[in-house]
Amino acid sequence: MNRINQLFQDSPKNLLSIYFCAGCPTLEGTADVIRTLERNGVHSIEIGIPFSDPMADGIVIQEAATRALRNGMSLRILFEQLRDIRSDVRIPLILMGYLNPIMKFGFEAFCQKCVECGIDGVIIPDLPFKDYEETYKPIADRYDIRVIMLITPETSEARVREIDEHTNGFIYMVSSAATTGAQKDFDSQKQAYFKKIQDMHLRNPRMVGFGISNKQTFDAACANSSGAIIGSRFVTLLNEAEGDAEKAITQLKENVGR
């Protein structure tokens, strides 16, 4: 069974997933960050593929991507760094990146490398759903790679149900239509959106991302889904700690009450 599906089968609630950008703050730190996060009880990890135009990301992750690219990070180097990661890492690993570098690499070659490294899924925020269904899904299915789709408060109920029917793993429930970035709390409008999606009784589990940085937002996410994805706050802490992932994740868990 794919590790993503296994995770939600074994631990359906209060999951903590962490995003960080490969190659930031140091080029060689990727594998160490992954191992440190698993050792500290993180349930899954999203590894960002740096890109020059990350349109869905706020300033923190934009700057991390720029720094990673300046450090020399590329998709080929990332796969090389992840080559032996499954010798000791057991939790689900998901690559998150934009379509352009993945298309340049070649999607089938990308999936082949994912299998070689033990990558379980991929999130491509700018992949149109129609293209996913017609072109990318058959290839990803062949390699047992989960393609995780995003929904926002603006996503229609019909599209949400279509995504639920044609994807596997989990649905990434974006907390707002804005870019990534820490928030202090979720307002009543966002809470209503969470409740609306919960009441749809979807087949796939859901994880909430964008804006989660403290106990209030983490608890609100977990109350309305299987758990939370934290990116910008962890990236900030990792940079402040000069790449010390142990220090960064310890502080983050204190912030969210874990």
Image (spheres, grey):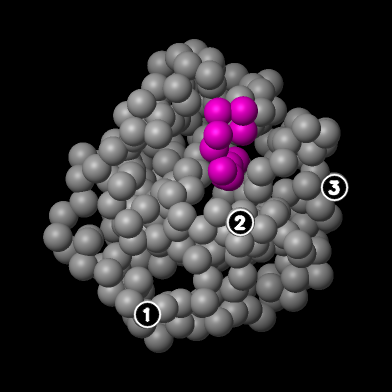
Do labels 1 and 3 touch, CB within 8 Å? no
- The residue indicated by pointer 3 is 116
Name which quarter of the figure residue 217 lies in: top left
Callout 2: 10 Å neighbours few (<14), some, many (20+)? few
Type of amino acid at the residue the image marks with label 1: Met
Q: CA distance from mark 1 to mark 3?
A: 37 Å
**Quadrant (top left/top right/bottom left/bottom right) for the N terminus:** bottom right
Q: Earlier in the sequence, mark 1 or mark 3?
A: 3
Q: What secondary structure is marked by label 2?
A: helix
Q: Residue at x 66, y 28 (%)?
A: 35
Image mark for residue 200: 1
Q: Nearer the viewer, mark 1 or mark 3?
A: 1
> Measured from the top left, where is residue 104 in percent x and y?
71, 53
> Measured from the top left, where is residue 126 in percent x and y?
51, 61
Type of amino acid at the residue the image marks with label 2: Asp
Q: Which residues are magenta?
A: 38-47
